Structures are given as structure tokens and as C-alpha cells.
Image (tube, helix red, strand yellow):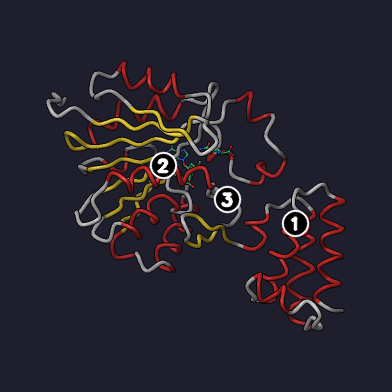
């Protein structure tokens, strides 16, 4: 069988399952199975597919047809141009979150030795991208999931960033007790109970812990917003990803804690609310 035939067969099966871009996904799976880049694969479609590629390709395609997300099937997701390993049990980084990382890169001088906490680091997407671009920064990457921390550590190793990242296990800001950071960034779970029920089936392969933000989706913000000023230096920056309808409520939570200057709401490229930034006041009385 030639690559071309395997690809048509895969695209047809993926389409039957209602998968959105069947031809593209077929190409991604086949490139992965053959260790080719996509352009390399497309240039060799007429060639016979060697046996080792068959052994990798068909079982992976079967998993994908069973509904397993493409990223878990091939084992990685790109984020900020970097490759992040992912596996079931760990949240798949989303393109949407790049808005938050870009907003921080716009504001942070790359020559300074920032201390940055990434709370709920998952695969390490946010913290490790920041470490990659801010070559002097030290990252404290926390998560309540040991599985996530193990994957984040492996990603730090693969990206050559291990020496500047500290991994800490525990809920919310508890593992940061005793630290003072310049920036606290988080993409916490923020899906409400109601919304959880309507998520596409693929998302259900991801850990509920990474998605569920309690009854109204705001539980994590109720912890992080009042606790963050104890961990941030005066003048420090809190940067939170939010759900697209949560801007007003998260801003209310920030305003009701008297520790912050006026927050800023950021939107994504589609114009939807995506993140909130707030600076801790300089004159804060600490308890
Ligand atoms: N930061 C990663 C990203 O943007 O791709 C992962 C974000 S995922 C939406 C949320 C992460 O928070 C998950 O890795 C989850 O394990 C972690 N998490 C959930 N509840 C937590 C808690 N109470 N304290 C710390 N981390 C938590
Ligand atoms: N953006 C994710 C989704 O809709 C949710 C991320 C989160 O809860 N932080 O699948």
C-alpha cells in the first residue's frame, strides 16, 4: 500500500466519524507514524509505506476513531511554537492561552531575573514558554496533580529549561508559601457545572480536575484572587485566563479585594474575553 492509499482510507474513516478536518488529521497521524514532516509526507505520497509505519499508523488511527484526542494519540501539542508532551491525565494546552503568554511577554523585560509562579501548570505550557522567552527568569510551576507535574518536568527537560524551573505540588497557592514572586500566572479550571455537561465528547478524555471550576466556574478565582497578594511582591502582576463570559465577575472579585490596582481585561483574536491582569498595590498592608 502506498502512503497515498493509507491517507485516503484514513481520511474516509475519520470523516465517517464526523471528525472536523479528516484529511488534515490523516496527514498529521501519517506524518507522525512515518517520522516525516507534513511537507515530506506530501512529497512522498506515491511511495510504498514501509512495515514499521503500518505498525504505528493503524493502531493510532484506531484510537483516534475511538474518540481519543489527536494530541493524546500522537503524544504532543504545539504551544507558542514549542513542542509539549501530553498524555491522558494532563490538560492539552490550547491556542487561546497564547494570548495570556503574549501579554506577559509584552510587559516583561527579557533581561530581568523575574520570579514567576505558574499555578496549575499542567503540561507546563505557560511557565515553560515564559522560561524559554525570558532567559533570566525562574519559574515556580505548581499543580495539584502529580501526573501533570511529572509531565511538566519532562517537558522542561526536553526544552532544556530544568535548571530554571522549580516544581511544587499542592492546591492553589499553598505550595508557594514562603516565596515572593513578581508574577503569578494561572489558567485555572473555569468551566461551570452546566457548561461541563455540554462539552464535546473529546474534551471528556481530559482530566475533570483541569476543567471543572465548581458550580459557577469561578471557584479557583475565589481562592487565587484573595490569596495572590500574599505571594506577590508589592507592584507584582497577577495574570489569569478566564472563560469568555467571566470577565465582569472576575473583575468584581478583584475589585472587592482592596489589594489591587484597577484590573485590565484582555480579549483574544476573536474579540472574546480571555484574560484579566491586575497589579498588586505598592502600599499594601500585609497581614
Ligand atoms: N496551565 C496549563 C495550560 O494552560 O495548558 C494547564 C491548565 S488546566 C486548564 C488547569 C490545571 O490546574 C490542571 O493542570 C489541573 O491539574 C490544575 N489544578 C486544578 N485544580 C487545582 C488546584 N486546586 N490547585 C492547583 N492546581 C490545580
Ligand atoms: N478552554 C478550555 C476548554 O474550553 C477550558 C480551560 C479551563 O478550564 N481553564 O476546553
- Closer mark to the observer between disc 2 and disc 1: 2
- Label 3 CB less than 8 angstroms from ligand 1: no
Q: Where is residue 146 in the image (x, y as percent from the top left)?
A: 46, 51
Classify 226 as above or below 111.
above
Lower sequence index among marks 3 and 2: 3
Lower sequence index among marks 2 and 1: 1
Residue that badge 1 annotates: 64
Q: Distance between the residues labelled 3 and 2?
A: 23 Å
Q: Which mark is residue 89?
A: 3
Q: Residue at point 48% right, 58% down? A: 151
- Closer mark to the observer between disc 1 and disc 3: 1
Q: Where is residue 106 in the image (x, y as percent from the top left)?
A: 32, 46
Q: Residue at point 14% right, 29% down? A: 282
Secondary structure beneath disc 2?
helix
Lower sequence index among marks 1 and 3: 1
Secondary structure beneath disc 1?
helix
- Label 1 CB less than 8 angstroms from ligand 2: no
Q: In which quarter of the image is the N terminus?
A: bottom right
Amino acid at each position: 500500500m502506498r502512503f497515498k492509499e493509507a491517507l485516503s482510507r484514513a481520511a474516509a474513516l475519520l470523516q465517517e466519524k464526523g471528525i472536523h478536518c479528516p484529511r488534515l488529521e490523516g496527514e498529521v497521524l501519517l506524518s507522525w507514524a512515518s517520522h516525516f514532516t507534513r511537507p515530506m509526507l506530501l512529497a512522498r505520497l506515491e511511495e510504498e509505506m514501509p512495515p514499521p509505519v503500518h505498525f504505528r499508523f493503524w493502531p493510532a488511527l484506531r484510537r483516534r476513531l475511538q474518540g481519543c484526542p489527536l494530541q493524546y494519540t500522537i503524544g504532543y501539542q504545539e504551544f507558542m511554537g514549542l513542542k509539549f508532551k501530553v498524555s491522558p491525565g494532563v490538560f492539552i494546552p490550547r491556542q487561546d492561552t497564547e494570548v495570556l503568554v503574549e501579554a506577559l511577554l509584552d510587559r516583561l523585560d527579557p533581561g530581568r531575573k523575574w520570579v514567576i509562579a505558574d499555578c496549575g501548570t499542567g503540561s507546563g505550557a505557560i511557565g515553560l514558554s515564559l522560561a524559554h522567552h525570558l532567559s533570566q527568569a525562574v519559574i515556580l510551576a505548581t499543580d495539584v496533580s502529580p501526573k501533570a507535574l511529572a509531565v511538566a518536568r519532562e517537558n522542561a527537560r526536553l526544552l532544556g529549561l530544568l535548571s530554571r524551573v522549580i516544581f511544587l505540588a499542592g492546591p492553589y497557592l499553598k505550595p508557594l508559601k514562603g516565596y515572593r514572586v513578581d508574577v503569578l500566572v494561572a489558567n485555572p479550571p473555569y468551566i461551570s457545572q452546566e457548561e461541563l455537561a455540554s462539552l464535546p465528547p473529546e474534551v471528556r478524555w481530559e482530566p475533570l480536575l483541569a476543567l471543572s471550576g465548581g458550580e459557577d466556574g469561578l471557584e479557583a478565582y475565589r481562592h487565587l484572587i484573595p490569596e495572590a497578594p500574599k505571594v506577590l511582591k508589592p507592584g507584582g502582576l497577577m495574570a489569569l485566563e478566564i472563560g469568555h463570559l467571566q470577565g465582569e465577575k472576575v473583575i468584581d472579585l478583584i475589585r472587592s479585594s482592596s489589594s489591587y490596582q484597577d484590573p485590565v481585561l484582555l480579549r483574544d483574536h476573536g474579540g472574546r474575553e480571555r484574560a484579566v491582569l491586575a497589579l498588586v498595590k505598592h502600599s499594601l498592608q500585609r497581614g
